[in-house]
Image (spheres, coloured by chain):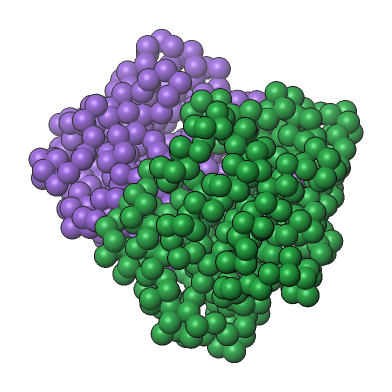
Chain colours: A green, B purple
């Protein structure tokens, strides 16, 4: 762990320290759009086999770094490892989303589940973190991550993906106490899971609140934000003599940016529907911002991508002594994207970013 | 058309005139959650057969009014009637969303399509409006509607529903001029379609911009809002000596409420993720607001629904001389909802609404 970090631009931007240019990474950067990912995935046999094999998880984590000038690596894993470790039986049917064999249907189910041991059932994740950190050898920082309690709860109660969230919303509105017990167990689990990732070598952690934006404002506060706050308050914020920054990303959460920042997170992730300049004016450089190009822009020609990157950087504007911006997509990259377009995106950020620092 | 309107609470609220209590209706109120709807749908044979039969469309339009104390009826139809009339070949596979046999794939396809004649290929819709208006006999106002140009374009280019909007976004970013030609033809078509509905008896019109919220802010302005503005500017705003109010509903559009209001629409529809009181503070009673209960709340017990209706009314707050609020869900009702819960919702609005007027 004593290896010197060769590129700390990402960490510095998260902590609102000066950088030479805007750092960039991409949600789902180790993924299906890369032919080398698809080859490793085929070798593993299944998506879960890939996630649970630390060597292969390390291999796919590093693949995008070989192609692109990225400022961070992110652990390759799934957001549903915690519910799987709780005994819900996660699987991925061909061409389908995630499915749980034993979803949560009632209070008794909630009472039965416990907080998984990160170095027990989830040791494969920590092994992956250790392996990746070793193989990275200080090249760029490693991001660990987890789903938010609310997001995990939606999958656990729905039994998989959902468009209407009928089961979790029925439970949330009719039996809020039961859902709070579930969310509290999840918040404890996520806290210990992320702290174990930090102990294993993760230098930044991000919480993906993919479905927080499906809630009304009071429900977001009560069922999602409150538990992210609980996690942020319980995280180890220093390792190896460096601060470990925390990023909270609520898809559809731009309207709540002040409240998300007030959790004490170092950085708020934003989807592409909001204007970065407007959000910056609201948070007054009191928190770092991450985002927010439309993932759909990667379908466009490289020169169009270049222009949009420049527009987003300009929307954020000239940096102050206390501002921080990490460039990212507003959501994960889509599987059909041409890898050459990703190169145009990454290179455009570093090229155009310089003039704003 | 000279029949006196017996309940004009909805029209008055849209025009920000005093009312005794808050009016209420529900997007997709004529729909699958009602057993009588499912019976008529079965009789018709298919969804499109139901839409294209004015007598049956009238029958399902009136069904929710028999059960509930609703303040408006909405034409039963599909948002994709215009692309179908343009020759794209609309169908609904069992359990699937809409599908087009001949989607728009290139500039040549866009050049080929024309503006449909509302009393030609779309005469079945106008016949439905005339039939419903006659059968309503002044009981409540009738809402006509259309999809927004952007929303129609997404289906036309994707060939159906989409999660990632890969085709329309690739076209929008790579060939914006082609997409603008398409959107302009759609704006012309929607204008003439809604004006024909007004001539046939629609007393209010709503534009459903279901997918405007999938865009970045600049793209929303350029590809969605601009064409809704074009439509609003071209609509007949008076019929039978009464103003015909216009409602614009962009799902996920709460952040753009000021700009949507600036089109000259009488009312802005809001989804459930925003706080009505915050939005009201921003628009300063300069426009009527419609919304915004989470459709997922209808899974809850009647007493929970009652409390949430009261909370939303209180969030809007006491009415001024120039405020207007129409209660609605933040999106269409889900098909599995218990019809008794809908009664709890409608009755709660009228009961609790009184104290705010």
The residue positioned 64% from the left and 54% from the top of the image is A132
The residue positioned 22% from the left and 52% from the top of the image is B179
Query: Please, is residue B27 above or below residue B223 in the view?
Result: above
Query: Please, is residue A205 above or below residue B73 in the view?
Result: below
Q: Quadrant of the N terminus of chain A?
A: bottom right
Picture quadrant of residue A145:
bottom right
Q: Position of residue A68 (x, y in %)?
A: 43, 61
Q: Position of residue B58 (x, y in %)?
A: 38, 25
Instruction: Please state the total of marks drawn on the protein image.
Output: 0
The residue positioned 55% from the left and 28% from the top of the image is A45
Q: Position of residue A136 (x, y in %)?
A: 60, 60
The residue positioned 11% from the left and 43% from the top of the image is B108
* The residue positioned farthest toward the bottom in the image shown: A321
Query: Please, is residue A224 above or below residue B118 in the view?
Result: below
Which of A284/A207 is in front?
A207
Residue B34 can be seen, yes or no: yes
Q: Position of residue A110 (x, y in %)?
A: 84, 34
Q: Is B238 left or right of A80, judged from the image as shown? A: left
Residue B356 can be seen, yes or no: no
Picture quadrant of residue B102:
top left
């Amino acid at each position: 762990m004593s290896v010197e970090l060769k590129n700390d631009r990402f960490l510095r931007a998260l902590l609102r320290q000066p950088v030479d240019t805007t750092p960039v990474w991409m949600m789902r950067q180790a993924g299906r759009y890369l032919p080398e990912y698809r080859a490793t995935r085929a070798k593993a046999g299944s998506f879960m086999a890939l996630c649970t094999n630390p060597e292969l998880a390390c291999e796919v984590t590093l693949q995008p770094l070989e192609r692109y000038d990225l400022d961070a690596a992110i652990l390759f894993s799934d957001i549903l490892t915690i519910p799987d470790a709780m005994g819900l039986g996660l699987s991925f049917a061909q061409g389908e989303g995630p499915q749980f064999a034993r979803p949560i249907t009632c209070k008794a189910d909630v009472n039965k589940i416990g907080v998984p041991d990160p170095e027990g059932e989830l040791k494969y994740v920590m092994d992956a973190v250790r392996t990746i950190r070793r193989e990275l050898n200080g090249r760029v920082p490693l991001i660990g991550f987890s789903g938010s309690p609310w997001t995990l709860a939606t999958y656990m109660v729905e039994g998989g993906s959902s468009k209407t969230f009928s089961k979790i919303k029925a439970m949330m509105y009719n039996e809020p106490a039961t859902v709070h017990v579930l969310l509290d167990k999840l918040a404890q689990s996520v806290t210990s899971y992320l702290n174990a990732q930090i102990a294993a070598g993760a230098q930044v952690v991000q919480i993906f609140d993919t479905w927080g934006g499906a809630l009304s404002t009071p429900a977001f506060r009560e069922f999602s934000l409150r538990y992210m706050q609980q996690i942020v308050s319980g995280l180890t914020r220093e390792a190896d003599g460096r601060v470990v920054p925390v990023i909270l990303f609520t898809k559809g959460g731009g309207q709540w940016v002040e409240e998300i920042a007030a959790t004490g997170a170092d950085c708020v992730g934003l989807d592409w529907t909001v204007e970065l300049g407007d959000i910056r004016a609201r948070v007054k450089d009191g928190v770092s911002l991450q985002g927010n190009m439309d993932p759909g822009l990667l379908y466009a020609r490289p020169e169009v991508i270049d222009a949009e990157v420049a527009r987003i950087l300009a929307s954020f504007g000239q940096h102050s002594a206390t501002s921080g911006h990490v460039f990212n997509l507003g959501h994960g990259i889509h599987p059909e994207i041409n890898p050459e377009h990703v190169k145009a995106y990454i290179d455009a950020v570093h090229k155009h970013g310089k003039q704003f620092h």
